[in-house]
Amino acid sequence: MEADSYNEINREVLRTLAPPGRVYYLLLGLCVAGIIFGTLCEAYQFYVGMGVTGLMHPVMWGIYLISFVFWVGIAHSGTLISAILYLFRATWRTAIARSAEAMTVFAVMAAGIFPVIHLGRV
């Protein structure tokens, strides 16, 4: 295996500072279009009501209840990972445990959104 020279390594590192190309702007445009589409869908739901999501009589569950349960499950998994690492006293656990605990916090915040949306029209 041949070692790279300092010039090659320097060029490779500095290449990350180059201006973005067309693909970047195309993906950025797709992300912005997705955000606009999601905002319009949410506004449409606020205007029309919860029937848009399939939440109506006799079906009393819908996408928001399922999403709430999903995010609570993700939060539980982060807590479980952190607890197992603590119980086994793994010496390398610090970074992974912090990531798992951060995942738990963000999952609980995401889960907290859905009961508020589930209340109905704003």
Image (tube, helix red, strand yellow):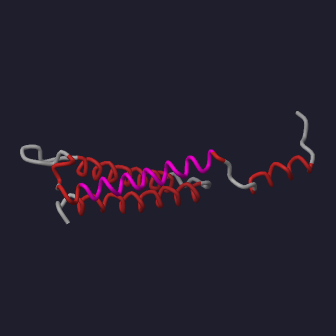
Residue 69, compared with residue 94, is above or below; it is: above
- Queried whether the magenta region covers residue 105, the answer comes back as no
Residue farthest along the top direction in this orientation: 1
x, y percent for residue 60: 12, 48
Count of numbered badges drawn on the protein: 0
Q: For the C terminus, which image quadrant? A: bottom left
Asked whether, in this view, residue 72 is left or right of residue 87, the answer is left
Looking at this view, name the residue that lies furthest to the bottom: 122
Q: Is residue 36 toward the left or the right of residue 22 in the image?
A: left
Please name the residue shown 93% across and 46% down the image: 5
Depth check: 23 or 114 in front? 23
Percent of width and height locating residue 25 = 60, 51
Front-most of residues 38 and 119:
38
Using residue 50 as the reference point, say whether residue 1 is left or right of it.
right
Q: Which residues are magenta?
A: 23-44
Quadrant into which the N terminus falls: top right
Frontmost residue, 79 versus 13: 13
Question: x, y (%) of residue 3?
Answer: 90, 40
Which secondary structure class fits the magenta region best? Answer: helix
Residue at the spot 74% in from the left edge and 53% down from the top edge:
16
Q: Quadrant of residue 120?
A: bottom left
| Residue 21 in the image, given as x and y percentages of width and height | 68, 49
Task: Please report the residue visible at 18 percent of the width from the left and 45 percent of the height from the top.
Answer: 54
